[in-house]
């Protein structure tokens, strides 16, 4: 008898609309597709445009990586027109409202789409920030796996802190949303964490016990990006050609450049930017300072011109020239500490 080829498994992935969540979940989706799985990613039009190159590359490679776009009427929900990602919010204080709105608005259209998917999905991988997907898993009798981009240590800490807190210690709205995420995890099959056990074996072991062995440390999933094109095509498109920054890096000594990132959603005030810029100037060291366009206020632009800054560069291809990578949210004190450790700087925000 001829052996029958087993049917392909179909995973449906729900990435949260935030940079630090979307990129690793897209990496997971691609890894699954590379292992001969059918993968459907469900997101909104703007976020789909950010990862369009990933889908184009997958299509050329013959991978079954599919995309479904759900309309997100941001203006009707009280946000600026076209605001579909956490890093587009005018204020980080709107974050909770944004995620609550996303869970409410996307629930019904996602349910309609899910019902029509073929072949029938075998598993949901959902960001923990989308508790509504637990209802889809229950309705369609499909296992749901929660994705966490943090470490096992952080998850254990969160679990213990949450247990120790009284209801009055947390904002009522946040308490309600955290409760929904926790309830979704209770009915989920397990957790996927963007970490690896060798990094935090004790914490991974304890978390696995707490989750009845339904924990999979699959990270760092960014390592699946082997080629140069895979790396530079992730996320938002760089605003300039990488050669501008690479030429600067080529002029520096080996292991003499530090990369400092304050996070992809960091929003400093103009005065905080100026304080950081003054620290860079006082370092008397060469540096590249990357400022996103949306952070370039009139006050900041006036100061940078008066201070003699000539460029605002952005690229995704620094890693093979840089040996130290630090993330922090203070300005002058920590910046000087970094400069004493390593000579030159690339600062992004």
Image: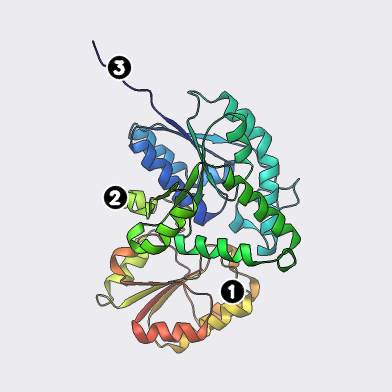
Picture coordinates of residue 181 (x, y %)?
A: 62, 50
- Mark 3 surroundings: few (<14), some (14-19) or many (≥20) residues within 10 A: few
- If you read the primary sequence from the N terminus, does the residue marked by circle 3 or circle 1 appear first? 3
Q: Which colour assignment does the render follow?
A: rainbow
Instruction: Answer whether labels 3 and 1 touch (C-beta < 8 Å).
Output: no
In the rendered image, the vertical position of residue 227 relative to residue 2, given as above or below: below
Instruction: Answer whether labels 2 and 1 touch (C-beta < 8 Å).
Output: no
Residue under label 1:
301
Q: In the image shown, does 14 or 294 lie closer to the viewer?
A: 14
Nearer to us of marks 2 and 3 is: 3
Q: Which mark is residue 4?
A: 3
Please tell me whether mark 1 sits on a helix, a strand or a loop: helix
- Mark 2 surroundings: few (<14), some (14-19) or many (≥20) residues within 10 A: few
Please tell me whether mark 3 sits on a helix, a strand or a loop: loop
- If you read the primary sequence from the N terminus, does the residue marked by circle 2 or circle 3 appear first? 3
Picture coordinates of residue 280 (x, y %)?
A: 46, 83
In the rendered image, the vertical position of residue 342 relative to residue 319, given as above or below: below
* Residue at the image point whose x is 71% and y is 68% from the top: 169
Is residue 280 in sight in this rendering? no
- Mark 1 surroundings: few (<14), some (14-19) or many (≥20) residues within 10 A: some
Residue under label 2:
227
Mark-to-mark CA distance, 2 and 1: 36 Å
Please tell me whether mark 2 sits on a helix, a strand or a loop: loop
């Amino acid at each position: 008898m001829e052996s029958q080829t087993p049917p392909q498994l179909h995973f449906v992935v729900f990435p949260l609309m935030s940079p630090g969540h979307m990129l690793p979940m897209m990496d997971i989706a691609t890894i699954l597709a590379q292992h001969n799985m059918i993968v459907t990613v469900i997101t909104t039009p703007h976020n789909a445009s950010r990862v369009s190159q990933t889908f184009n590359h997958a299509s050329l490679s013959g991978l079954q990586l599919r995309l479904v776009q759900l309309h997100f009427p941001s203006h009707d929900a009280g946000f600026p027109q076209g605001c579909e990602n956490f890093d587009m919010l005018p204020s980080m204080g709107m974050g909770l409202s944004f995620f609550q709105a996303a869970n409410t608005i996307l629930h019904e259209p996602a349910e309609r789409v899910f019902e029509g998917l073929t072949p029938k999905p075998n598993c949901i991988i959902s960001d923990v920030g989308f508790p509504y997907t637990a209802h889809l898993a229950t309705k369609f009798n499909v296992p749901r796996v929660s994705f966490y981009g943090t470490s096992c240590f952080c998850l254990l800490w969160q679990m213990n802190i949450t247990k120790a807190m009284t209801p009055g210690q947390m904002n009522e709205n946040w308490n309600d949303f955290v409760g929904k995420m926790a309830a979704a995890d209770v009915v989920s099959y397990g957790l996927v964490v963007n970490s690896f056990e060798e990094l935090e074996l004790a914490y991974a072991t304890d978390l696995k016990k707490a989750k009845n062995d339904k924990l999979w440390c699959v990270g760092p999933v960014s390592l699946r990006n082997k080629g140069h094109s895979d790396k530079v095509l992730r996320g938002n498109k760089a605003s300039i050609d990488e050669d501008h920054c690479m030429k600067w890096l080529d002029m520096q000594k080996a292991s003499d450049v530090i990369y400092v990132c304050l996070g992809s959603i960091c929003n400093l005030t103009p005065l905080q930017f100026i304080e950081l810029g003054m620290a860079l100037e006082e370092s008397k060291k060469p540096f590249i300072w990357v400022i996103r366009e949306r952070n370039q206020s009139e006050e900041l632009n006036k100061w940078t011109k008066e201070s003699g800054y000539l460029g605002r560069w952005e690229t995704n291809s620094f890693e093979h020239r840089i040996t130290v990578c630090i993330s922090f949210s203070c300005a002058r004190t920590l910046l000087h500490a970094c400069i004493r450790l390593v000579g030159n700087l690339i600062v992004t925000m």
